[in-house]
Image: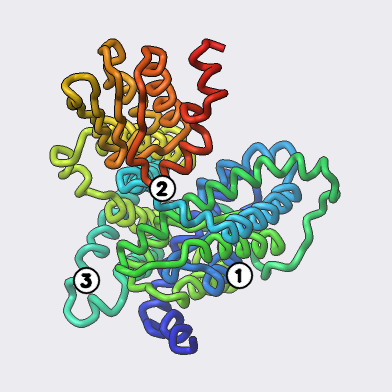
Amino acid sequence: MLQHYKEEWFSNVRGDLLSGIVVALALIPEAIAFSIIAGVDPKVGLYASFCIAVIIAFVGGRPGMISAATGAMALLMITLVKEHGLEYLLAATLLTGVLQIGAGYLRLGNYMRFVSRSVVTGFVNALAILIFMAQLPELTNVTWHVYALTAAGLGIIYLFPFVPRVGHLIPSPLVTIVVLTAVAMALGLDVRTVSDMGELPDTLPVFLWPDVPLTFETLAIIFPYSAALAVVGLLESMMTAQIVDDLTDTEGDRNRECKGQGIANIGSGLFGGMAGCAMIGQSVINVKSGGRGRLSAFAAGLFLLIMVVFLDQWIGQIPMAALVAVMIMVSIGTFSWDSLRNLREYPLSSNLVMVTTVVVVVFTHNLAIGVLVGVLLASLFFANKVGRYMVVESRAEKEGAARRYVVKGQVFFASSEKFVESFDFKEVLEEVVIDLQHAHFWDVTAVSALDKVVIKFRREGTEVEVVGLNEASATIVDRIGVHDKPEEAEKLIGGH
């Protein structure tokens, strides 16, 4: 246990601390921007990012993943803040945490296995596009200095790792931020800086309880928002965890992450912060800057607080162009370029799922809707594909007086109609044997189809025998089916 604890916290101290600094710098403008989106004071987003990052370092299930205030969550808060104010947002944040902890204990994190690779790829590509689009306001109607700084920043990011000895010791995004800030200050460039985004807080967060009445009316107001925040937060966190798993060739604990996100959001709400979740952009920055352990998330939150409270005058001088360069790097690194190269090789259904997920997320800016559409589309394609693999073969027996039908494949709602159509009810037979040893019946629709076939043959005066049902299929057929229950079957045969 102690060895596992040391490995998660102290196996990569230098890399985690340096990447934590880079992530903290990248979190500042985003936390401010997300606060503005939600309609609250910038310190609400900054305090949330600090609390969530620090708490998740201890209780999260995915070392190396960064959680803080996010745009996806901020978009869901706009109406609540506008209509009821900050105190109700803090109350909704606490309830969000409770719902997410409940999801963890219900082991809902395990259901990520139902999200196909095509949906995950679409989710990743959509986020990469959204991250890039979020930088465009900083590159619109600006002087040439901004473009020059951004281009120089990208040059440093991609070329510094090739510098002998120090190239792999210091994260290139950190070098970019330091160098461009120094250049902008030395030359007195008139460019937009972090301080232009909003006023940085000058005090530490303090414990506070939301000033709302503890009534069912309050619950009715905040519950819809909290439920939406909990779902979106867990979806983005689970997807980000899967991406970090792939980047680091390690595996996290999904259900522990659900609980951790809930605990972190409760902590955020109690210290004046809004709800947040895992951030794919910052998580990618962390991994690419060398962060791997829990110390990286803790360091990011701690450095963030130190910077905005005690080093606000220096942090405020960072040109936004430097952070834009870092986020463009994140966008490029996040996008799955292989998905474009594989469009010709992958099945059309997989490509449609991926592209649809991208389009829905980009146009709605709602990750939950995009993922839901992708999962539903993937499920429909899968059901259609599996349904086509069901076949019914037949052969005559007893010199044409009997026929044996052999069913092979999966019988469920998508293949039940084909199942019924595979039988010839007009053929004059004394006996029909339906052999199901190579088939599996999954749902009520499949059992109803079997009832329909058996009863149709009996109406024609044919004796029917069903054989070969496996144990699982026999269980659902015995419980739901009526063809072997004389009273119920007689009603159907008689048309009642």
Amino acid type, label 1:
Val
Badge 3 local density, few (<14 within 10 Å), some, or many (20+)? some
At 41% across and 30% down in the image, what residue appears? 446
Marks 2/3: CA–CA distance: 60 Å
Q: Residue at x 18, y 19 (%)?
A: 400
Residue depicted at 31% across the width and 48% down the height: 117
Q: Amino acid at mark 2?
A: Glu
* For residue 192, side relative to residue 462 (left or right): right
Classify the position of the C terminus by image quarter. Answer: top right
Which element type, helix, strand or loop, lies under badge 2? helix
Left or right placement of residue 99 versus residue 236 in this view: right
Where is mark 3, residue-wise?
161
Which amino acid, mark 3? Answer: Pro
- Tell me the CA gap for discs 3 and 1: 32 Å
Q: Are marks 2 and 1 in contact (CB under 8 Å)?
A: no
Residue 76 versus residue 48 in the image, above or below: above
Residue marked by disc 1? 309
Q: Earlier in the sequence, mark 2 or mark 3?
A: 3
Residue 471: which disc? 2
Would residue 318 be seen by someone viewing this image from the given angle?
Answer: yes
Q: Looking at the picture, how far across and down is residue 251, in whole percent?
A: 38, 67
